[in-house]
């Protein structure tokens, strides 16, 4: 039994299907993940190795070259490039495009094994290579925590407390800090005193490192239980270091470290990163969404949690939102809903004008049904609502009505020729279903080349092919089932109009135009070729841009100073730039990242 015959005979089943799609489509739409851009995998890793005191040439020969040799043995490797500077080696390893997020973890594991094997042959004084293959997260939310009069230590403690609470929010993947200063203890030795007492600096450092070492002191059986022993004497405060006794030379005299050294707690100088918000020191808090999560849900959960924590924040501490992707995504999704409503309304109005009220409403309803069914399939195949999938739905809107129009028009014409509505529906679907299926498949495959590409472009645009393919195939299914069903039960009865069917102003005008095109075929062909040439020429004036312009009201400025410039000098230069930008019309706030830009925000 054909689909159309089954649909017409089992009308209750089709009615249940329509109700199911409307309800299921709405619920699926509410549950779909929402992001600004689709996920894609960065197929590159960075290997950092420190070699303090070495020249760039020594770093190249003793660090970079051995590690590059080991990396090049990786069969999945596409390209390796390196930078050797004084005291540091930076190597970029990029794997082939055919590896995706499912297969990349195994590639990175193999790369780690090769680098770790090569690390055993590196010269003394060099650090272990640090492999970073996890820098692809984009922060859906980024806060700059500021507090006028608060110390860096206080801001960092507030940031750490917030992270503990916000990690509990729904769809939060990870939370990272930016601009956190590393706390250190400075031991400044008085060389004159230490030399007089016969205490070498190395002895002081060795004593400090040994004193705070955690060691297993064993255990003792007390009754039925084992009681673990712990060696006391750990440093609980900076002052404890000063009270540490150390032997002075060969005399056997014990003196305190504070007698020959000044001990202070502070931050690593110079700092590695600095963050400022409107000129105030700040600590950055970046929140990324869990894979496949809903950034809108995460944003709402974070807002709710912050409202609960507001009373716990110290007076004067402010959470400044640098990026809040949930608001951007909400605007995009709301814009899509508006576009969808407008598109359906335009289609219905045009169809009502050219086909009649009932035909227009039928096809408009089937269009909405197709989109809701597409939401169900997107939820099943884990396709999120984001810039590409929303664009695919908007692109598909103009094509989703084609199948329904052909079937509905065919049924109307056959019925006007005197064939019963049910028989007209069966005949029309039998004549058009396979040509329509072929045309639908061809239209779908037009987008396959981009989305199925084995590179980052294909991964980024994968949802384009998925959404368009799903929606177009669903439009065909509904065109050969739901459209005949609705036409049979909704269209009015018509009397036979054999001769008058095509005898109206539109068809007479079209007949004259078509006859002229055939009679003057060379002129017609020349006009078509001319329009094609004009289109090709005009295409050269169209801006080429892989990523569309960001709707965020933000812009970034990158400033790079010569290598070796002290970070405080960079901060001073940027301070002048901050002051100038803050005076520009329309600028509401300025955030400065010093020591490295933060591309994860954009």
Image (tube, grey):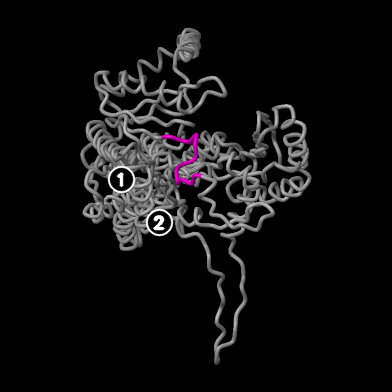
Tell me the magenta residue range: 262-274
Residue at disc 2, secondary structure: helix
Residue at disc 1, secondary structure: helix
| Rendered location of residue 472, percent (x, y) | 43, 42
Do the residues under discs 1 and 2 have CB atoms within 8 angstroms? no
Instruction: Name the residue located 67 percent from the left edge and 44 percent from the top edge.
Output: 127
Q: Residues within 10 Å of mark 1 (few under 14, many from 20)?
A: many
The answer to which image quadrant residue 179 occupies is top left
Residue 272 within the magenta-colored segment of the rendering: yes
Apparent side of residue 556 relative to residue 580 in the rendered image (left or right): right
Q: CA distance from mark 1 to mark 2?
A: 23 Å
Q: Quadrant of the C terminus?
A: top left
Looking at the rendered image, the disc whose residue lies closer to the viewer, 1 or 2, is 1
Instruction: Name the residue located 29 percent from the left edge and 48 percent from the top edge.
Output: 487
Check disc 2 and report the residue beneath it. 5
* Res 106 seen here: yes
| Rendered location of residue 187, percent (x, y) | 53, 45
Front-most of residues 449 and 358? 449
Q: Earlier in the sequence, mark 1 or mark 2?
A: 2
Instruction: Name the residue located 45 percent from the left edge and 14 percent from the top edge.
Output: 518
Question: On residue 368, which mark appears?
Answer: 1
């Amino acid at each position: 039994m054909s689909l159309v015959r089954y649909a017409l005979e089992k009308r209750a089943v089709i009615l249940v299907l329509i109700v199911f799609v409307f309800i299921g489509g709405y619920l699926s739409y509410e549950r779909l993940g929402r992001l600004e851009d689709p996920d894609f995998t960065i197929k590159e890793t960075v290997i950092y190795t420190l070699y303090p005191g070495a020249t760039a040439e020594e770093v190249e020969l003793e660090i970079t070259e051995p590690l590059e040799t080991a990396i090049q043995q990786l069969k999945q490797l596409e390209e390796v490039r390196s930078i050797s500077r004084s005291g540091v080696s930076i190597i970029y390893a990029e794997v082939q495009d055919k590896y995706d997020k499912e297969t990349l973890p195994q590639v990175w594991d193999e790369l780690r094994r090769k680098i770790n094997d090569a690390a055993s042959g590196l010269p003394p004084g060099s650090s272990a290579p640090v492999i970073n293959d996890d820098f692809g997260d984009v922060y859906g939310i980024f806060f700059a925590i500021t507090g006028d009069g608060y110390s860096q230590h206080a801001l960092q403690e507030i940031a750490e407390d917030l992270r503990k609470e916000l990690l509990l929010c729904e769809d939060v993947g990870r939370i990272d800090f930016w601009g956190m200063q590393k706390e250190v203890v400075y031991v400044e030795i008085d060389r004159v005193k230490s030399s007089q007492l016969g205490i070498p600096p190395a002895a002081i450092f060795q004593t400090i490192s040994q004193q705070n070492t955690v060691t297993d002191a064993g255990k003792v059986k007390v009754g039925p239980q084992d009681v673990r022993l712990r060696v006391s004497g750990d440093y609980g405060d900076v002052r404890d270091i000063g009270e540490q006794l150390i032997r002075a030379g060969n005399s056997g005299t014990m003196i305190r470290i504070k007698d020959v050294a000044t001990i202070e707690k502070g931050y690593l100088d110079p700092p590695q990163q600095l963050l400022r918000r409107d000129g105030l020191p700040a600590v950055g808090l970046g929140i990324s969404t869990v894979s496949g999560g809903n950034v809108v849900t995460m944003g709402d959960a974070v807002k709710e949690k912050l409202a609960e924590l507001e009373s716990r924040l110290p007076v004067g501490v402010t959470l400044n939102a640098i990026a809040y992707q949930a608001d951007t995504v909400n605007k995009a999704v709301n814009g899509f809903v508006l576009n969808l409503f407008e598109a359906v309304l335009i289609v219905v109005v045009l169809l009502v004008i050219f086909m009649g009220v009932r035909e227009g409403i039928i096809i408009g309803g089937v269009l909405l049904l197709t989109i809701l069914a597409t939401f169900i399939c997107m939820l099943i195949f884990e396709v999120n609502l984001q810039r590409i999938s929303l664009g695919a739905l908007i692109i598909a809107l103009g094509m989703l009505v084609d199948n329904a129009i052909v079937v509905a028009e065919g049924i109307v014409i056959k019925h006007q020729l005197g064939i019963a509505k049910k028989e007209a529906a069966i005949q029309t679907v039998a004549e058009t279903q396979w040509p329509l299926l072929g045309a639908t498949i061809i239209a779908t495959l037009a987008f396959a080349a981009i989305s199925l590409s084995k590179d980052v472009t294909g991964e980024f645009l994968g949802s384009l092919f998925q959404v368009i393919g799903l929606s177009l195939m669903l439009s065909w299914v509904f065109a050969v089932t739901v459209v005949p069903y609705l036409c049979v039960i909704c269209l009015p009865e018509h009397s036979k109009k054999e001769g008058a069917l095509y005898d109206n102003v539109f068809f007479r005008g079209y007949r004259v135009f078509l006859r002229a095109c055939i009679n003057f075929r060379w002129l017609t062909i020349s006009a078509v070729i001319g329009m094609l040439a004009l289109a090709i020429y005009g295409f050269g004036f169209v801006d080429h841009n892989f990523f569309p312009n960001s709707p965020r009201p933000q812009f970034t400025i990158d400033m790079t100073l010569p290598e070796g410039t002290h970070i405080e000098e960079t901060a001073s230069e940027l301070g002048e730039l901050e002051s100038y930008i803050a005076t520009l019309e329309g600028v509401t706030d300025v955030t400065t990242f010093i020591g490295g830009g933060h591309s994860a925000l954009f």
